[in-house]
Image (tube, rainbow, N blue to C red):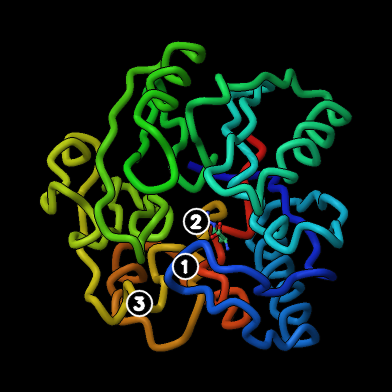
Amino acid sequence: MANHSVLMSSPEYFKVEYSINPWMVAGVEVDLDLAKKQWNNLKESIESAGATVEVVPPNEQLPDLVFTANSGIINGKDVLIANFKYEERRGEEEVFANWFNENGYNVARIPSEYKFEGRGDAFVYGEYLIGAYGIRSDKEALMYIADEFNLTPIIVELVNEKFYHLDTCFQKLPTESNDAIFYPQAFKDESLSQFSQFFNLIPVSEGDANKLACNAVVVQDTVILPSDGIEVANKISDLGAKVVVAEVSEFIKSGGACQCLVIALN
Ligand code: ARG
């Protein structure tokens, strides 16, 4: 599916201050100048691939606000805002809710007892809700969303703390054969049988998974990969997609790469 417009949040206050996933070493040094360059380069790559980029202003108290994928789930002009698992990120909920309100979306909330982390763990795919639960998001949240948006839930369970969001271990590709890359060891059902009716599933190696290869952004027919040396890149080109690399090493220190820094608005 094509993205024509996406939302990002600028990295002025990005840092790794706390640790809420195995990639994060609290207090590890982030090269902020490099992070800003990488973020701008990703933004330019997205624009060159054919999408416009909207930007949420940064917030000094919220270093993970850059990861706009986690803001919520968007269905047309309706948005259900995230209920973050960890206190450290909960302040982002109001920032994102305000942005969506001010930009003409109908904003609603999921019951607060159900944790849910947005595009990190779910997306709308035609009349289906493709989602994952088990680490950051709850199954009940996905069921609630499917009900609210009138979608059929197709959901899987994540079991590997290192691949704590669906977008760290699964990405659909903009190819005619509905291909998707995934890292089998991240899932309870390594064959991902629930997804195989929709996608032609292509496993990535452990090396690729550890480079967050599945956290690529798809814009029109372009796949933007987060680092050089990703083995599955050739296969993606062979399938007819255009492959571009936008190095985001500073953000990987926080456990996020290209897809985490973006959410499609349409
Ligand atoms: N440090 C952030 C966290 O652990 C990274 C979020 C990455 N986002 C994503 N969609 N996978 O919450």
Residue to which mark 3 is pinned: 210
What is the number of the mark on residue 242? Answer: 1
Which amino acid is tagged 1? Lys
Q: Nearer the viewer, residue 264 or 18?
A: 18
x then y, percent, for residue 24: 52, 74
Classify mark 1: residues with Cα within 10 Å, few (<14), some (14-19) or many (20+): some
Q: Is mark 3 within 8 Å of ligand 1?
A: no
x then y, percent, for residue 106: 74, 18
The residue that appears at 51% across and 69% down in the rendered structure is: 255
**Callout 2: SS:** loop
Which quadrant contains ligand 1? bottom right
Q: Marks 3 and 1, how far apart in space?
A: 22 Å
Can the viewer see residue 244? no
* Relative to 97, residue 29 above or below: below
Question: N-terminal of the two: label 1 or label 2?
Answer: 2
The residue that appears at 38% across and 20% down in the rendered structure is: 143
**Callout 3: SS:** helix
Residue to which mark 2 is pinned: 221
Q: Marks 1 and 2, how far apart in space?
A: 6 Å
Residue contact at pointers 1 and 2, CB within 8 angstroms:
yes
Can the viewer see residue 179? yes
**Callout 1: SS:** strand
Q: Nearer the viewer, residue 237 or 182?
A: 182
Which amino acid is tagged 3? Asn
Which amino acid is tagged 2? Asp
| Left or right: residue 54 compared with residue 201 | right
